[in-house]
Image (cartoon, rainbow, N blue to C red):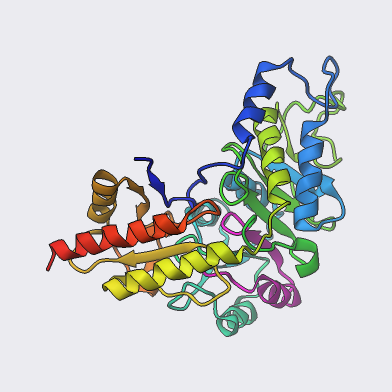
Amino acid sequence: MMPVYLNNAATSWPKAPQVGGTVAAYISGLPHHAGRSGFAGPDVPGACRNLLAGLLQVKDSNRIVFSPNATHALNIALHGIRWRTGAVVVTTVAEHNSVLRPLYYLSKSRGIAVQLVPVDKMGRVNPEEWEAALQKHKPQAVVFTHASNVTGAVNDAALLTRMAKQAGAITLMDASQSLGIVPVLPEAWGIDLVAFTGHKYLLGPTGTGGLYIAPDVDLEPVWVGGTGIQSDLEEMPVSMPIRFEAGTPNDPAFAGLSTALAWGLEHVLEDNNILHKTERLAAGLAELGADVILVEPPRTPVISFTLKDWPVEDVGELLYQGFKIVCRTGLHCAPKIHAYLGTAPAGTVRFSLSRFTTDREIEYCLTAIGELMHETV
């Protein structure tokens, strides 16, 4: 029996068709790196950047900087900001450790004050509380996740950004859980910085990610080194995107991401079918008696739940060992949100669907949960 894979919020599987073949063909072929002497061949990074620019609806694809993952992209942003003495950052309790840990490091090393805004029972930021924090703390920057990796709740990014910009703050959004499944529109929403990854809902390979940097945002480069161009300069070139792309890039993986993007552009971003399946699974779990975190749209295909008298790690282990269902349990690298969801300290069982999840797999998962719960009766 093939596994039922419901861990797409961690990394997607299966990938978009032909992604693996594209990566393998690139690795097997003659190496080439566009823009550097001694290499001849197609501009793989440029083609991928153009596809991403179309998806993000940004005018200049060179404002998209490549990185190995969203964590690197977030660090480029957070460590690249020219922080003022006594600076404040407003963020939320829903953030992933890829945001929380860099902020904690900055608080220790730079004295930056970090202020956390709470979320509701769905994991969504309340705009009134966001506005209150902005008015009280007058932050230099704000950081917020577009979609919670624990509950799937999608924040109103345009509204949160507009409030933050009115307060004079730099805006950084983590789109790791949203890009590829719901619209992400940096320029239309006025967001300064957007970090993303390629291996989740973009259906690309691991080792791919990036950061959109608005034209009027001035960051210091975090990593410096070889670029293959302007090698006589002692400092990193000022031209984009090479200013933030020191070293040899992972072209095979970004070739694979291009394949995934080309496939994805043929499909509707807001996939009603996958959201219908998500609602069916959430409702079915609730009918069985599971404690499900119910989320109103807009949302991503993520469901978190617990079973009474069952440790979450035991549920995950038994689902895999007994039913070959792959899911995720625990805090999901977002430790602070669980106090607001009522799931601290253990966290939740998380199912995260993909476009390839079938109705039959949904029903199979509900049958499996029903059998587990029957064991406790």
Q: Nearer the viewer, residue 46 or 70?
A: 46
In the image, is residue 256 above or below residue 375? Answer: above
Q: Residue at x 55, y 75 (%)?
A: 297
Report the front residue among 82 and 153: 153
Residue 342 is at least partly visible in this image: no
Q: Residue at x 59, y 38 (%)?
A: 205
Q: Residue at x 13, y 65 (%)?
A: 376
- Residue at 52% x, 70% y is 153
62 relative to 128 in the view: left or right: right
The spot of residue 117 in percent (x, y) is: 52, 74
The quadrant in which the C terminus is found is bottom left
Specify the quadrant of the image occupied by residue 243: top right
**Image x and y of residue 340, in percent:** 39, 74
On screen, residue 277 versus residue 37, left or right, reads: left
| Residue 248: % across, % down | 70, 26
Magenta stretch in the rendered image? 153-178
In the rendered structure, the answer to whether residue 111 lies left or right of residue 223 reads left
Queried whether the magenta region covers residue 165, the answer comes back as yes
